[in-house]
Amino acid sequence: MGKIKGGGFLLRRLFSKVFFILTVACIWEAVKAIGGYSDLLLPGVMSILRSLWLERIQIFHMTLFSLQIIGIGLLVAIVLAICATILAFSGRIFSEIITDVLAILHPLPGIAILPIAILWFGIGTKSILFVIIFSAVWPLINHFYTGFRSIPANQLEVGRNLGLSGLKLGRDIMLPASFPHILGGIRTGWARAWQASVAAELVFGAAGGNGGLGWFLYKKRFMMETPGVFAGMLVIVLIGIAVEYIVFTWVEINTVRKWKTIIN
Amino acid sequence: MYKKAQKVVVVLLLGLLATAFMAGCSGKSENSEVKLDEGLETIRVAKQFGLVYAPLMVAEKKDFFSKYGLNVQWKTLGSGGAVREAMAANELDAAFMGIPPFLIGWDKGVEAKIAAGYTVSPVSLVTYDPLIKSVKDFKPEHKIALPSPGSIQHILLAMELEKVMGDPNALDDNLVALPHPDGAQAMLSKKDIVAHFTTPPYLFEELSKPGYHMVLDGFDAFGGDFNFNVALVTQQYHDNNPKGYAAFVMGLNDVMNWVNENKEETAEILAPEFKIEKEKLLEYLESDGMNYTTAPYGIMGFANFMKESGYISKIPEDLQDIAWENVLAQIGKREGKPSTMEKIQWAK
């Protein structure tokens, strides 16, 4: 089950994906035709694609901006999460504090702290970055911490019996055992970072020319260009799919699937 | 071995699902329908917060609509964009918005027309930077706050930019979309933004501070008076509820006149609502340029510019395309040269 598949398999998967997309497009058009919806309420697939094509340069720049800010935010959040996890494992007090802080702040949506972010950092990129980091860091800590805590004791003992210790034990036993959680954390963090960046830009727009896809959606919404709104959402979805299937799947195949630490 | 584990996981999750489902069913509560008064026409109207809504708030307090047999269901919505979307989705029968946002909606097929003008109000671009005297003086790092893209403020700025610099989009990269209160707060703390395109009371508040001055007067940019907002009623409501429509328009006229005649009492009624002192509110209500009127002003004036600059794809061929008959009758159709009322619908 955990083997890396051959070319024929990839082709079949690609085919099934294309088939899926075509089916969705057909259902979409059918709903539009049967319901008699105007382009304002439910734009057709073609007008969404046309809008995507017409706005490609703007969308490209805004996508780059979004990816850049999310990348920075996620990286900072991961570093912070690693620090917090190290802290949590270096003393009972820290571990309790971090558990409490997590319980308080994890359920708080990142967008809810936007008013405070604006007060502290002003209107602009810094505030969005703050909201992104805030949104991503809690699920990251949660997953990292759970991951290392849920390493089965018997695996650790087997490792020790084999004479492993210190860094070697960490690399060969602890990391593989907790990696599904770490990967899950990064996946959640990535999703939360996207949500935060789009939501923040939807609330207060962008500062000047610097804006990401949330700002694009905002502008299209206020111009009532519904096809443009869907085009923006489509780009967000496509990036999500691309990252999921290219980055995360690759990491998964080369780590947890190879090590067989998950059951699928 | 893995296959077996998968099966166990599926069964486990199905069990959880069933539990959740049963919990959901037992927790279901009955929805209580709101009973409406028999024999009354009902209209669903969007309301936002701001001084411009003062007449509407008075109407609500003093039952100016119910005396014409109209029951108004107020729906509070956060932004002009949401109001327009609610109209498109037939969640609203009537709303108030600036002419440019209305034209954008009209262009995209929102079926509503102007049922009345709704006030003429100053709207101006303010700055605290002494070096900025005209729109030409803005540098790329200068941020300008206005409520949203496509708002009346945005279009007025674009009109001026076209006149002065030949490019309506010259400052698009300087714009920050901020609701009026947030913009005013940022302006007064001189943080992030250097200019704010806004309306009373924020406009008066900012201009009353030393060093804050006007860069652009909206009336100058437009070349005449224009309705700050217009009252819109959807095609569906207008066609199916003539009595409700008539009552809505009459109620608006009634309250508007009442506010003009009784500004002091208006201030008294609304001071607690706006949480400002009565005297200050009266000052705002009586400030220069405020005109509480339902007459149409400049309702065609934005269309040409918006078409040329690409904000809309078509312009109304005739007033009939964007206004209901009571407004058309007010404007009239003079044989020969256009009348004064007809002329003031266009920008100079």
Image (tube, grey):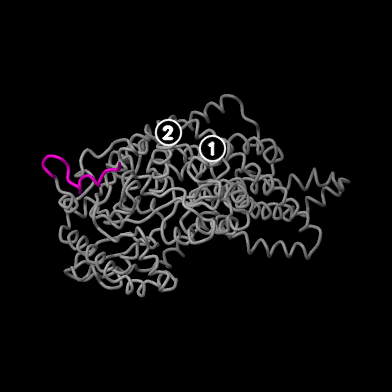
Q: Which residue is mark 1?
A: A62
* Rendered view: A96 above or below B237: below
Q: In this rendered view, identify the residue nearer to me: B197 or A57.
A: B197
Q: How many marks?
A: 2
Q: Chain of mark 2?
A: B
Which of the image's four quarters has the C terminus of chain B? top left
In this picture, which residue range is highlighted in magenta? B334-348
Label 2 secondary element:
loop
Q: Badge 2: few (under 14), some or many (20 or more) residues near its Cα, within 10 Å?
A: few
Q: Which residue is mark 2?
A: B166
Q: Position of residue A141 (x, y in %)?
A: 69, 54
Quarter occupied by residue B140: top right
For image coordinates 60% across by 34% down, the residue present is A246
Q: Mark 2 and mark 1: span between their CA atoms?
A: 26 Å
Q: Residue furthest right?
A: A163
Q: Please, what is the dominant secondary structure of the magenta stretch? A: loop
Q: Badge 1: few (under 14), some or many (20 or more) residues near its Cα, within 10 Å?
A: many
Q: Residue furthest left?
A: B335
B187 with respect to B273 (left or right): right
B207 with respect to A180 (left or right): left
Q: Chain of mark 1?
A: A
